[in-house]
Image (tube, rainbow, N blue to C red):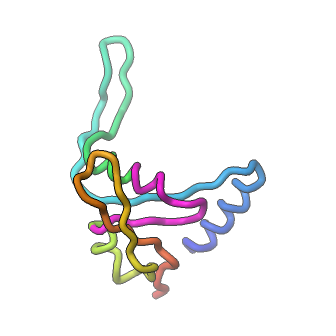
Amino acid sequence: MGEKLRVELGRLLQTWELGLGVGVHTGVVIEGLMGGADVKAYRFVGDTVNTARRICSEARPGQLMLSEMAFAQAASITVAEAATEVVMKGKTSASKVWSVARLVEG
């Protein structure tokens, strides 16, 4: 089902010359209603959110990329390409990320 959704979403976005890449990271986040007295919005913040965002910015249209922590949790249900090293703003060393080729059926 995931592959069908990815293909269909890609087809629909291509109509408007748009694309969607996804970056996934796992960890602790801070979430809640944030803002001033007059304007509030529900937000998710923290290093986990920032890391996921940076991985997402590396993903090409139609690509799903996983951080090392996310890949460790999903390795048994994914077939991924070899890990690549990505330098991310705010990090002292490059981080490994995996591009998911497909999900394992079953």
Q: How many labels does the image show?
A: 0
**Residue 93: x percent and y percent?**
25, 58
Q: Which of 81 and 92 is in front in this view?
A: 92
Q: Which of 98 and 14 is in front in this view?
A: 98
Identify the residue shown where x is 75% and y is 48%: 16
Which part of the image, by quadrant, shows the N terminus? bottom right
**Left or right relative to 11: residue 76:** left
Residue 74's image quarter?
Answer: bottom left
Identify the residue shown where x is 36% and y is 32%: 42
Outermost residue to the right: 15
Magenta segment includes 61 = yes
Outermost residue to the top: 38
**Left or right relative to 71: residue 56:** right
**Above or below: residue 82 compared with residue 43:** below
**Above or below: residue 39 compared with residue 20:** above
Magenta segment includes 59 = yes
**Residue 90: x percent and y percent?**
28, 45
Q: Which of 2 and 72 is in front in this view?
A: 72
**Above or below: residue 1 compared with residue 61:** below
**Left or right relative to 82: residue 50:** left
**Residue 25: x percent and y percent?**
33, 59
The residues colored magenta run: 53-68
